[in-house]
Amino acid sequence: MRKIDISQVAKLPTIYGTFNIQAFKEADKEHLAIYTDNLTDNPIVRVHSECLTGDALGSKKCDCGEQLAYAQKLIAKEGGMIIYHRQEGRNIGLVGKVNAYALQDKGLNTVEANHQLGFKADERTYDIVEYILNHFGLKKIQLLTNNPTKIELLKNIEITKRVPIVMDSNPYNQDYLKVKKEQMGHLL
Ligand SMILES: [Zn+2]
């Protein structure tokens, strides 16, 4: 059994509302659960994969920052939890991701670029997500996602409903969203 360090729970006031925040450390990765006081036994949950360029820098190459803001707004209003899953760049890390962006600048799409670097299109794993849901005693959730593989990957959690999260495209992320839809099965 791996060792997970779990922080205390603290309050996190944000521009969207006030959440509770708790950190989970697994080896060299630290993840977050951000959740409202009124958690039900079947809450809305967003599993948000870390995307430093989208979440913090306002990158237009993807829709991550907008999805995170949408999730925070919705969950502040409806109740629920965001698991901030620190697997940057679909778990290829920042060096891998920036190298993939450099290949995209030369005309490859997001999947082709990952393959050229020796990565799968998606290297993420979801054990820690299940661990965190278990920690909160959550056995069923309404998953806020467009990604049907996320529904399959959460094997031990009942997904009672998929809540869509649909963002507008812009000229920079059109191709990215198209590849997500056509090659990665996203429901956009
Ligand atoms: Zn992103």
Image: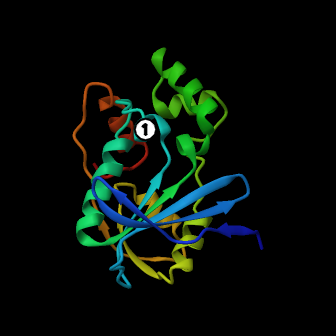
Q: Residue at x 37, y 66 (%)?
A: 19
* Quarter holding residue 158: bottom left
- Above/below status of 132 relative to 106: below
- Above/below status of 106 relative to 146: above
- Which percent across, then down, holds residue 22? 53, 67
Give amino acid for label 1.
Ala
Query: Horizontally, is 145 left or right of 137 in the view?
Result: left
* Quarter holding residue 7: bottom right
Query: Horizontally, is 52 left or right of 123 in the view?
Result: left
Q: Residue at x 29, y 31 (%)?
A: 174
Query: Horizontally, is 145 left or right of 168 in the view?
Result: right
- Above/below status of 172 relative to 157: above
Considering the image in quadrants, where does the N terminus appear? bottom right
Q: In the orientation shown, which residue stands out farthest toward the top?
A: 106
- Which percent across, then down, holds residue 99? 59, 24
Residue corresponding to mark 1: 56
